[in-house]
Image: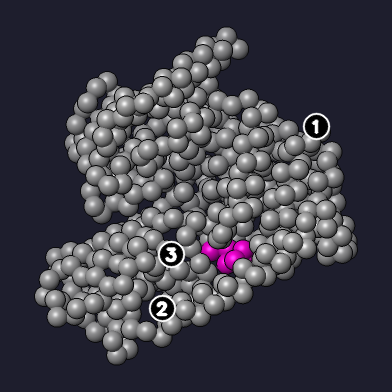
Amino acid sequence: MVPIKVKGYLLAVFALLCTVATANAQAITQDSKPNKPINIDRASQLFALAKTLSDADGGKLWGVRLYGPILFVDPQSRMIVTNKIDKQQQLTKHSEDVYVGILPDEIGIANTTTKWAGVSWAMVMWPPPRDPEWAASLLLHESFHRIQPKLGLKLSSPDNHHLDTADGRIWLRLEYRALAKTLNEVEPLDSAALRDALIFRNYRRSLFKLAKKEERLLELNEGLAEYTGIKLCGADEQTQYKRAVMNLKMHDQSSPLVRRFAYGSGPAYGLLLDKAKPGWQREPGKTVDYGKQLQRAIGYRLPRDLKQQALSRAEQYNFEKLSKEEIDRDNARKEKLAAYRKKYVDAPLLLLDMIGDYNYSFNPGNMQALDGIGTVYGTMELSAPWGILKVTGGALMIETPKGLRRILVPAPQDTGKFSTNEYQGEGWTLKLNSGYTLIPGPRSGDYSITP
């Protein structure tokens, strides 16, 4: 996952490396008595494992070595353990290439990439997965985000609201199922299931105006990061395929998918492209669609009667049951949206403009598109020049006609305490920096912030 950070608006020799990686993996698995809140020994072992796997790749995958600054953070205590010293002397050396400190409150905590103390870090929340390959995959995923700008790939997180609708989810889940079947085939590139996946993918995109653009952007972001983690985590090809299938099956059952779908599709298409077109990563990334790239690589042309073929092929993937599930879900979603409209449109609100240098972190599995208005984030941490907002009960993000992002939360409680710099409301707390205060907003009962 990546944060949004804006200004104004990451053969013998190989055998030896694999041996070291295995030894590190065994050491990590044997860790049974962690120090609190972060086991520094285990953190050090994970740094060594990530470096070993990165060295084994040698920058071949992306033309850039992945290993670099990594920051583990404990969400409760905000204790951090890193593999590099910072540039502002905020960290203390613990041992060779291991440093410790406390992460400031204004830095959001997530599995992400972030810039702090003069260094761009791959941030990983503690504890990481116990399975060594999954842990390595997570570290390399976030390390990809850290180097992503060097590859000319934007750190973007488009809305993909269409993937919260019944039709969007039906045809995405069908694509997932066809891809999973493909990866289990002996000759996946010759599989009829691969053609099914491409048909479902293209039919879905034909139904929604922004689908092609927004899906491509998230696959270039989270999709490539997840592919990189699985590709370089130390697993053999068969295990990589199994892990990609696990991702597909997990996301087939996930809700919502608007910011998560590429974690499923990205590794699948990446691994298939490895087989169909080695070196595909070197093609210009900004405009490439990896489904179309694979389609060209295997010489497949979509049928003209795309809708008819999609409906016909869907039957073998339990289409009728899936459709009922999604229609029922969509009905429940509409009820939830009505409640959101009351909460974030009709009721009094606090309006917070995302201005200056700001960054925010969020859980992509806890989001809901509010049709035609914005996106509801279940949880969020946002820091901006005016202060720090922590959301546990939901916040709506909208974009104003002038392109300004704005956060809306229920109006603050106990307005008699406005002489202080700390406020709270339903599911949120706000700490204002010196020089900022709350003032009446555009409607009766609304509030906003002013210097």
Viewer-nearest residue: 27 or 215: 27
Which of the two discs, 1 and 3, labels the residue nearer the N terminus? 1
Point out residue 404 in the picture as x, y percentages from the top left corner: 40, 71
Residue type, numbered disc 1:
Val
Q: How many marks?
A: 3
Which quadrant of the figure contains the C terminus? bottom left
Point out residue 328 in the picture as x, y percentages from the top left corner: 65, 70
Q: Is residue 203 left or right of residue 52?
A: right
Query: Which residues lie in the magenta part?
Result: 159-165
Viewer-nearest residue: 450 or 317: 317
Look at mark 1 in the image and give the residue it sits on.
Answer: 186
Point out residue 172 in the picture as x, y percentages from the top left corner: 68, 57
Picture layout, residue 11 above or below residue 380: above
Mark 2–mark 3 distance (CA, rounded to whole Å): 12 Å
Which of the two discs, 2 and 3, labels the residue nearer the N terminus? 2
Which residue: 34% across, 49% down?
Answer: 109
Q: Quadrant of residue 163?
A: bottom right
Q: What SS does tag 2 mark?
A: helix
